[in-house]
Amino acid sequence: MLNIVHMWVNGSEVELAVDPREMLLETLRDKLNLTSVKKGCGVGECGACTVLIDGVAVDTCLYLTMWADGKHILTTEGLKGPNGELNPIQQAFIDEAAVQCGFCTPGLIMTAVEIVGTGKKYTREELRKLIAGHLCRCTGYENILNAIEKVAGLNSEVF
């Protein structure tokens, strides 16, 4: 038996019939073709599938699509500006060389959007803890932290 789920994805209203056991990761990637949402570990340990749900970073591999009913979902595809320009966090990741293979990057960017969106100032150690749910095998995290620090304190309205 399928269930109807109504949600907003990257600002667009979406209504889908989904299996009650379907994870949001599958819905976003397979049904909505939002391939920035990566399938990594499948158990909430790597952060590759992170999106914002009502402004909160969530691992979609652990989140049933049914739970997204009535929610607002934001993926990295939804960060681009009206003329296709990059979000300041995306640009900071490029400027600070915080990307290498790119597999973990979308999830890290979404967590960074949540962090920066709070408007709070964090120490580098606090930022380390806030991104601890992400695994990156390429960068060593220093450039990622540099990128987040670069945009910290910007007006959260930008995001």
Image (cartoon, rainbow, N blue to C red):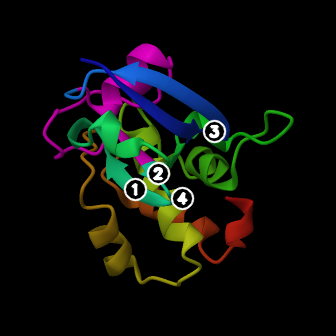
| Mark 3 crowdedness (10 Å alpha carbons): few <14, some 14-19, many ≥20 | some
**Given contact means CB atoms under 8 Å apart, are the residues at marks 2 and 4 in contact?**
yes
**Given contact means CB atoms under 8 Å apart, are the residues at marks 1 and 4 in contact?**
yes
- Which one is earlier in the sequence, the residue at label 4 or at label 3? 3
Q: Which residues are magenta?
A: 22-51
Distance from label 1 to label 2 (Cα)? 4 Å
| Mark 4 crowdedness (10 Å alpha carbons): few <14, some 14-19, many ≥20 | many
Mark nearest the camera among 2 and 4 is 2
The residue closer to the viewer here, 12 or 90, is 12
Disc number at residue 78?
3
The residue closer to the viewer here, 150 or 108, is 108
Tell me which residue sits at (63%, 49%) in the image: 95
Mark 1: secondary structure = strand
Q: Position of residue 155 (x, y in %)?
A: 72, 73
Disc number at residue 132?
none
Distance from label 3 to label 1 (Cα)? 14 Å
Q: Main secondary structure of the magenta part?
A: loop
Asked whether residue 48 is in view, the answer is no
Tag 1 residue: 57
Tag 2 residue: 52
Mark nearest the camera among 1 and 4 is 1
Disc number at residue 113?
4
What's the residue type where badge 1 is placed? Ala
Q: Quadrant of the C terminus?
A: bottom right
Tell me which residue sits at (39%, 15%) in the image: 30
